[in-house]
Image (tube, rainbow, N blue to C red):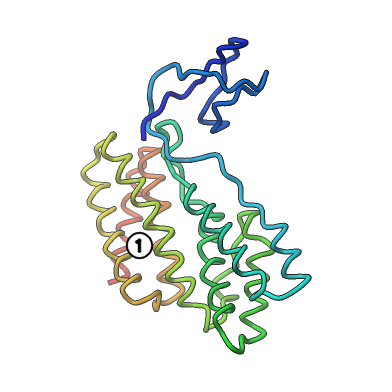
Amino acid sequence: MEIRGERECKECDHRWSYYETGSVSCPQCGSLRSVGVGDRERHTAMQVDLDLSAHRSAVGDGSIRDAAPALKSDLRDYIRQTGYIRGGELLPLGDTPLAAHELLHAVDVVARSNRPTDDEQFYVITLLRRADEGERPDPDAVPDSMADARGLAYAEAIDAYCRDLSTWLDDNPNPEVRTTLETLSNHRKRVEALDGAVSLSESEALVAAAREIHTALVDDDLDALASARDTLAALF
């Protein structure tokens, strides 16, 4: 959606950036009576933080299965509000959304299993410990039984990123990038059709390609675009 980037309080005339606060409430006097001013810009990145501290405590006091419903609900809320355009600026695909998507799927694997393995439970705890700090485990730390969960999670994260990137390209046309984005989307669709059953290296390659496309656009970097194409071509 396109919104005005600044708000002006009708009570105290204070102005602030809506893109930074995501709130119509005046940060100076607290009034809700404000109006949008300035130019409208495309904006999908809501001001939302991922805080898993309560869920870490819940798992520590009980079990992953017991903690799963509330944890999955909060992860879905975070994912739903995560966007990649802030005031017309295209943002990169960060590690926190990737980790949140993966944790959602990993928790589901353990919660649905009658006898989850120690490796599976430890992996969920590892994700839970660092996901809200933007850290995700290296591929060699992923248990074989969790590889499909990571593949599907990353495909879903890339899907959300590609939707915003495509919207950004509507406002900032770039035919060469659009073609590369379509190739990335085709790979993502294949991963989803396979329910994530691809190699961990392929999942990482798709993330790398999405980030290279972002670099190509924001830095006008033709080498980054060529690298994204090479990364995707190597997957065939």
Above-or-below relation of 40 to 101: above
In the displayed structure image, the side of residue 14 where residue 176 appears, left or right: left
| Residue nearest the viewer, comparing 174 with 19 | 19
Point out residue 86 in the picture as x, y percentages from the top left corner.
Answer: 46, 35
Quadrant placement of the N terminus: top left
Quadrant placement of the C terminus: bottom left
Among all residues in the image, which is located at the extreme right?
A: 61
Query: Which residue is drawn at the image coordinates 43% and 40% (left, top)?
Result: 44
Point out residue 150 in the picture as x, y percentages from the top left corner.
Answer: 49, 71
In the displayed structure image, the side of residue 124 where residue 193 appears, left or right: left
Label 1: element kind: helix
Determine which residue is flagged by label 1.
Answer: 231
In which quadrant of the rendered view does residue 209 lie? Answer: bottom left
Point out residue 168 in the picture as x, y percentages from the top left corner.
Answer: 33, 39
Query: Which residue is drawn at the image coordinates 28% and 34% (left, top)?
Result: 171
Above-or-below relation of 95 to 84: below
Query: Which residue is drawn at the image coordinates 48% and 74% (left, top)?
Result: 149
Neighbourhood count class around disc 1 (C-alpha, 10 Å): few under 14, some 14–19, many 20 upward: some
Point out residue 223 in the picture as x, y percentages from the top left corner.
Answer: 35, 48
Above-or-below relation of 66 to 231: below
